């Protein structure tokens, strides 16, 4: 089960002077190409899903594939929400299996960015999940020409970085020091002195957005100054597009699978180049040994219902399923009825939490308290309740 705690993963990279690639994926070709590259190089990797790409795929449908691929990988993997647009998306992402979260409020005034990020951090930490904040503004759009979206770069300052991290409690900070998202003409000027000062002030893993288009030397300087996570998408998208154009040129009457041939390898090759360049190659076993595995908890309740007929009990259960499955950190709510009528306990809840921290945050969550106090406890007389942590061998 090589999904690992993302905070541990990036701390390892930070302490050992390399950066983990956070590659945005938009399809199974990307997912498989990125993981092929991580396996070939024996490197840790972050699978990122950006909300700006949600019109290209159904997030809720793709996530089970992402999680299944991560679980069968032999290298350490984290699954990250990139540039989430709201608190609600963050909760959805956690409940679908992301174990790292970013909601991007960097285009807002500083105090709003702080308030939005602080509430996100409180929620995510209650689920055991680390948060990436972004301070300063990195313009551009992933996958497009940076010149088409020429918003002003707003540089991160050392003082603001210090107070932002203290006020929000973020685990990693994405900084703006001259990169832009998307395809660039010319070479971006990066402010290494600023990065160095931020790194000295914060002493925590830093993140660079807009990895596409930077030179080998620029990457080296970034990593030397505390960058432990590099976000990368446009170059993978361009490698895929080039392959499609090549396929179309070589066999113009190809069908879908003919046009899509070799995409996984093209994406994998560019991913592999980055992993080697950023120093992640050969780190998988150390990271697996040093990072906490990502383990879920099964919250089991078996109970009988008193004072309600079967229809009433089923109504109460349906309401609970609806309310409880929306609580942050709840991966799944299974409600069941004993198959033998004379079994000692008639009903069950099996509520799967993404992390042991959810045992407490779930118990105290207002939606849980209201449901338990008003609907469940008054009718569930005899019951047994146990939290089971997943056994990983
Ligand atoms: P590029 O598309 O420039 O590689 O940037 C990706 C990114 O920063 C995603 O968050």
Image (cartoon, helix red, strand yellow):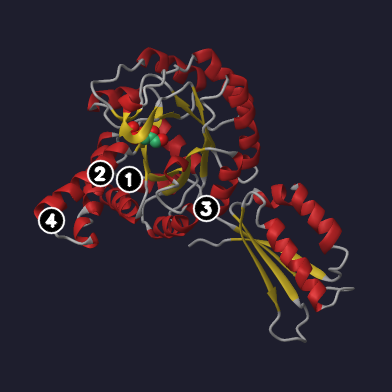
Residue indicated by mark 2: 272
2 vs 4, front mark:
4
Compared with residue 50, is residue 118 higher up or lower down, i.e. above or below? above
Report the Cα–Cα distance between label 3 and label 1: 21 Å
Residue indicated by mark 4: 252
Front-most of residues 53 and 291: 53
Q: State the image quarter where residue 325 is shown.
A: bottom right
Residue occupying image coordinates x 25% and y 20% = 187
Residue occupying image coordinates x 45% and y 56% = 67
Compared with residue 210, is residue 130 higher up or lower down, i.e. above or below? below
Front-most of residues 171 and 56: 56
Report the Cα–Cα distance between label 4 and label 1: 37 Å
Report the Cα–Cα distance between label 4 and label 3: 40 Å
Q: Earlier in the sequence, mark 3 or mark 2?
A: 3
Q: Is residue 324 visible?
A: yes
Q: Secondary structure at mark 2?
A: helix
Residue indicated by mark 1: 43
Q: Earlier in the sequence, mark 3 or mark 1?
A: 1
Whole-percent x, y for residue 215 in the image = 24, 26
């Amino acid at each position: 089960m090589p999904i690992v705690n993302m905070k541990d993963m990036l701390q390892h990279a930070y302490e050992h002077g390399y950066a983990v690639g956070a590659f945005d994926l938009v399809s199974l070709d990307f997912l498989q190409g990125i993981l092929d590259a991580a396996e070939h190089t024996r490197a840790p990797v972050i699978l990122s899903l950006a909300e700006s790409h949600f019109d290209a795929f159904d997030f809720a449908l793709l996530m089970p594939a992402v999680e299944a691929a991560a679980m069968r990988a032999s290298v350490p993997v984290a699954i990250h929400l990139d540039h989430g647009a709201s608190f609600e998306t963050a909760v959805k992402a956690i409940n679908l299996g992301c174990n790292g979260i970013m909601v991007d409020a960097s285009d807002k005034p500083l105090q709003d960015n702080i308030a939005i990020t602080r509430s996100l951090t409180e929620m995510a930490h209650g689920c055991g999940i680390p948060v990436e904040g972004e301070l300063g503004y990195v313009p551009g759009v992933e996958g497009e020409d940076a010149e088409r979206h020429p918003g002003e770069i707003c540089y991160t300052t050392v003082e603001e970085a210090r107070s932002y991290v203290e006020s929000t409690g973020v685990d990693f900070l994405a900084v703006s020091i001259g990169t832009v998202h998307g395809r660039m003409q010319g070479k971006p000027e990066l402010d290494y002195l600023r990065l160095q000062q931020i790194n000295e002030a914060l002493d925590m893993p830093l993140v660079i957005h807009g990895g596409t288009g930077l030179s080998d030397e620029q990457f080296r300087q970034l990593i030397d100054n505390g960058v432990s996570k590099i976000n990368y998408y446009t170059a993978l998208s361009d490698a895929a597009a080039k392959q499609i154009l090549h396929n179309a040129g070589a066999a113009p009457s190809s069908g879908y699978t003919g046009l899509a041939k070799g995409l996984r390898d093209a994406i994998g090759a560019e991913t592999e180049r980055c992993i080697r360049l950023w120093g992640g190659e050969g780190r998988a076993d150390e990271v697996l040994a040093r990072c906490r595995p990502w383990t879920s908890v099964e919250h089991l309740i078996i109970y009988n219902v008193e004072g309600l007929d079967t229809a009433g009990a089923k109504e109460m259960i349906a309401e609970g399923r609806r309310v409880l499955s929306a609580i942050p950190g709840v991966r799944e709510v299974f409600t069941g009825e004993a198959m033998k009528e004379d079994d000692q306990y008639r009903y069950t809840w099996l509520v799967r939490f993404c992390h042991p921290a959810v045992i407490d945050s779930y118990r105290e969550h207002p939606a849980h308290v209201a449901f338990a106090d008003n609907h469940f406890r008054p009718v569930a007389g005899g019951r047994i309740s146990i939290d089971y942590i997943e056994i990983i061998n």
